[in-house]
Amino acid sequence: MPQGFESKMVASGQSGSSDLAARDRAARSRRIAGILILSVGAFVFSIQDTLVKWISGSYPISQLLAIRSLIGFVPLLIFTHYDGGLRSIRTRRLGALLLRSLMLFLAYGAYYLAISAVPLAEAVSLYYSTPLFIVALSGPLLQERIGLGRWLSVCFGLIGVIVICKPGAGVFDPAALLAVVSAIFYAAAQVMARMIGPTESASVMSLYQNAVNCAGALLLGLLVGSGLYGEADHHPAAQFLLRAWMMPNLVDLLIMLSTGIIAAIGSWCLAHAYRTTEATVVAPFEYTAIVWAVLWGFVFWGEVPGLNTLIGVAMIVVAGFYVLRAARH
């Protein structure tokens, strides 16, 4: 073999190895960035959860969501302007965007009703069974390879959900099931984010989500915002749903307005993380919100997680981190 040809073959092999290593580094960097962005989003939303629970005893959920959504348009339009321009709002994936937004409206609505009635740490822990549902949906919908180990981890985590709910116990609150329903809708929405992410930016997805939230909240307000049904049930979740709209004082209005800014930032972070990184990699890091929920619940309401909650949380977290470990191999 001529010496020049052999040198070219060696150089070609080295170049191929270098390109492969560069792609691996880029993939790792993308995953790390996705994990960090999602963790920031989880922290931001933990602040919103605290604010929502704080005012849930005085105002209806429809009024809160309407004010939050209206103020949320401001930062989201700015994000969209700098993330592809406002022309990117026009899309051929309108049906998929609206469906995803509707699922998120149902997810957040059910979740807020849950945190109005049950301890914050318990509601958040149940809600963050989401990664388990994402894994279950990623196989059939995203064609991601889901091995036996990850399926077993999903089952193990769901047992943790049952432990937290304490079915059959005298302290069981049906509102806890709203957090589980919320987790299912949220998981389906984030799987859809991976499906439409190649063509739609995080800003556009968040903007459509905010628009559907606003429309849904205003429609709900028209239906029950008069307070006609507000006294039909004394359960906190039912009151939060059916209570009449009222003029908020300055402090409460500022809290509601702040949730719009928080929601805009948080939803962008989560949408960006899920559209750029494998769902099974970033999803378990939503568990970081559980730590914040325990902290805020204790600081503001003196809530101390019970043994059932701690055991269930541990099972869910172990299952989630097994999913993360399996996704790396």
Image (cartoon, rainbow, N blue to C red):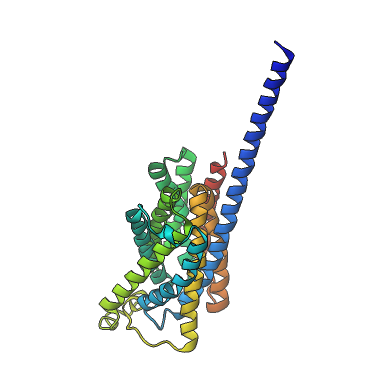
Total numbered circles: 0
Residue ranking furthest to the top:
1
Q: Using the rendered view, name the quadrant where residue 3 is placed.
A: top right
Residue 155 visible to the viewer: no
Q: Name which residue lies at 50% across and 70% down.
A: 75
- Residue nearer the viewer, 31 or 187: 31
When the figure is inspected, residue 196 is found, relative to residue 89, above or below; the finding is: above
Q: Name which residue lies at 40% across and 51% down.
A: 192
- Residue nearer the viewer, 293 or 223: 223
- Residue nearer the viewer, 17 or 56: 17
Q: Using the rendered view, name the quadrant where residue 69 is placed.
A: bottom left
Where residue 231 appears, as percent x and y from the top left, is 28, 83
Where residue 68 appears, as percent x and y from the top left, is 43, 74
When the figure is inspected, residue 96 is found, relative to residue 110, above or below; the finding is: above
Viewport quadrant of the N terminus: top right
* Position of residue 29 in the picture relative to residue 309 (left or right): right
Viewport quadrant of the C terminus: top right
Q: Name which residue lies at 38% across and 42% down.
A: 140
* Position of residue 17 in the picture relative to residue 255 (left or right): right
Q: Name which residue lies at 41% across and 50% down.
A: 196
Where residue 207 appears, as percent x and y from the top left, is 42, 64
Where residue 102 appears, as percent x and y from the top left, is 34, 61
Residue 125 visible to the viewer: yes
Residue ranking furthest to the right:
3
When the figure is inspected, residue 42 is found, relative to residue 149, above or below; the finding is: below
* Position of residue 161 in the picture relative to residue 239 (left or right): right
